[in-house]
Each structure stands twice: as C-alpha cells, then as structure tokens.
Image (cartoon, helix red, strand yellow):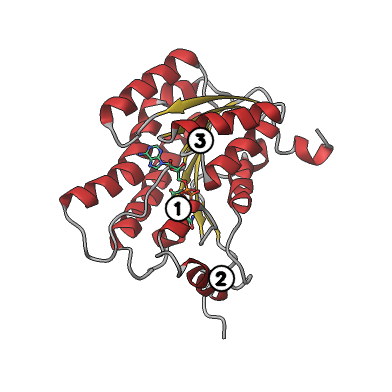
Amino acid sequence: MSKSDELLSLKGRTALITAGASGIGRAAALLFAAHGAHVIVADIDAARCEETVAEIGRQGGSGEAHAVDLGDQQALDAFLDSVQAGHEVLDVLFNHAGITGPPGLDFDAESWRACMTLNTWVPMVMTQQLLPSLRRSQAASIIFTASTAGIVGVPGLPVYAASKGAVIQFMKSVALTLAPEGIRANAICPGGTDTAGLRAAFQEGTIESSLAAISAMVPLGRLADPLDIAKAALFLAADTSRYMTGTVIPVDGGATVGARS
Ligand SMILES: NC(=O)c1ccc[n+]([C@@H]2O[C@H](COP(=O)([O-])OP(=O)(O)OC[C@H]3O[C@@H](n4cnc5c(N)ncnc54)[C@H](O)[C@@H]3O)[C@@H](O)[C@H]2O)c1
C-alpha cells in the first residue's frame, strides 16, 4: 500500500455493503477490499453476489457473500442475525440499497411501500440492529446512499425523492445521537451514475440518448462512473474523514450547485 493509500486504509476492518453486487455497491466492495477491509456483500442477486466476492478474492482481498432480499422482513432478520453471529465488530455500515420506485404520481400502497421499505426502512433498521456491533468498533462509520433527488427537486420521482430526503434527515439525527460515542454517520448524494439501475429506467432504444441528455445537464459534462461514487464512500469509511459527521455530500459533477448562466 502506498503512502497515499494508507490515508484511506481499512486494514483490519469489517465493512458491510448492501446492494454490493452491482454498480456503485460492487465498485465500493472491490475498493474497500483493496484497501484492506473484510467486506460483507449483501444483495438479492445470489450469482452476482458470489461473483463479486470471487473477484475480491482474485484481487487478493477478503469478503463474504450474503444472498438476501432486504425487502423481505424475515430474510432481513435472518441476515442480521447471521451478521451478528459471524462478526462481533462491524466498522463500516454502507447502507446503499435502493430502488427508483413508482414513476410520477402513479403509485399505490404496494409500490409506495416497496420503495419506502428498501430505501428508508432497511437503512434505518440495519443501523438500529447493527449498532451493538458498531459500538465495539474503534472507528465506526455509517454511510447512507441518498441521491441528489433527496436535496433538490427533480421531476418524475416524488416517492423516490421523499424516500431519499427521509434518509438524509435520519442520518443527521443519527449523527447527532451517536456523536458522543464517536460513531460517525454521513450521506452521499450521487448524481446520475452509469449503472444497470439507471439504464433500466429508460426504454430500450432510448437509453443512450437519455443518458446523453442527463450528461448534457451536468457541469462536468458526463455521468458519474460507479467508482466516482465508491471513492467518496471510501473517504467516508476511512479515518481521513474522522472529523466529519452529519454531512451530506453531493457527488454529482456539479449538478446541484445552481444556475450555470
Ligand atoms: N445510478 C444512479 O444514477 C443513482 C443516482 C443516485 C442514487 N443512486 C442510488 O444508488 C443505489 C443503487 O445503486 P446502483 O445505481 O449502483 O444500482 P444497480 O442497479 O447497479 O444495483 C442495484 C443492486 O441492488 C440489488 N437489489 C435490488 N433490490 C434488492 C433487494 N430487495 N435486496 C437486496 N439487494 C437488492 C440488485 O440486485 C443490484 O445488485 C440506490 O440506493 C440508488 O437510489 C443511484
């Protein structure tokens, strides 16, 4: 590890990443492992979960795969039990899983609940249930993936935006609640990031033009790469950010800064 990498070292630490088998979560799993963490990868996609952990192994890191539908309360409870049984100490909890949810105002109780469950309930209950393990860490860091949609108005995604706004406010209160114990909590707000999840939001045949249209609205002129977001998560996980808690960090190429002319 070079001197600059030491600043971001997670050597000897255990990190849990939800939705760690694809896109941003996968990039973070590989990056955290490359910086020394043992990474618990949780994802509903069993095959991709195993593949991510295999890739961590090929790169000389350490990880374990947990195939779990986090939106299923029984499965979530069983997963939390197994994490607690297997790991006395948890140093990094990266609450990353989330879905876009129903488009526009076209929601009903079921689609609302599915979005709110994964985006809001799951990070809340994971933080609550894993707190004893985080308390045993000397450097606990909780990271939430919110979204630029949680800080500025975006058209077409009111339920998603509400779920991410809730995550941000939850994080701020957790940060203040746990600060006396030295446990940190921060949120990342990615802008448009080129992942399978973003591509799936557009109809076949319009994907590239839609991504180009989003890129054109970004001051830095492109979508984020998953690694752009994962690097911000690594910064929040490591001691380099040890005096930061309660922060909301847009990683969006300047998209939420303000007027451009
Ligand atoms: N990609 C973007 O443009 C963007 C922008 C802002 C915020 N985000 C946030 O990033 C997160 C998603 O990351 P991504 O873009 O890398 O997505 P992605 O589509 O690449 O990956 C999503 C992962 O979540 C997993 N997953 C879905 N439902 C699950 C469930 N019920 N239980 C467990 N795992 C489940 C999938 O299997 C997949 O591996 C979400 O919280 C999303 O709101 C993404």
Residue 183 visible in the current orientation: no
Mark 3: amino acid: Arg
Q: Can you say whether 248 is above or below 12 in the image?
A: below
Q: Can you say whether 195 is above or below 74 in the image?
A: below
Q: In whole angstroms, how far apart are the C-alphas of marks 1 and 3? A: 14 Å
User: Where residue 210 appears, x then y in whole percent?
Assistant: 48, 70
Mark 1: amino acid: Gly
Q: Which residue is mark 3?
A: 48
At a point 72% along the width and 26% down the height, the residue shown is 60
Point out the residue furthest to the left here. Answer: 109
Q: Is the C-beta of the residue carrying label 1 under 8 Å from the nearest atom of ligand 1?
A: yes
> Left or right: where does residue 188 sit relative to residue 4?
left
- Check the picture and name the quadrant holding the N terminus: top right
Label 1 or label 3, whichever lies nearer to me, is 3
Q: Which residue is mark 1?
A: 197
Q: Can you say whether 123 is above or below 64 in the image?
A: below
Q: Which residue is mark 2?
A: 215
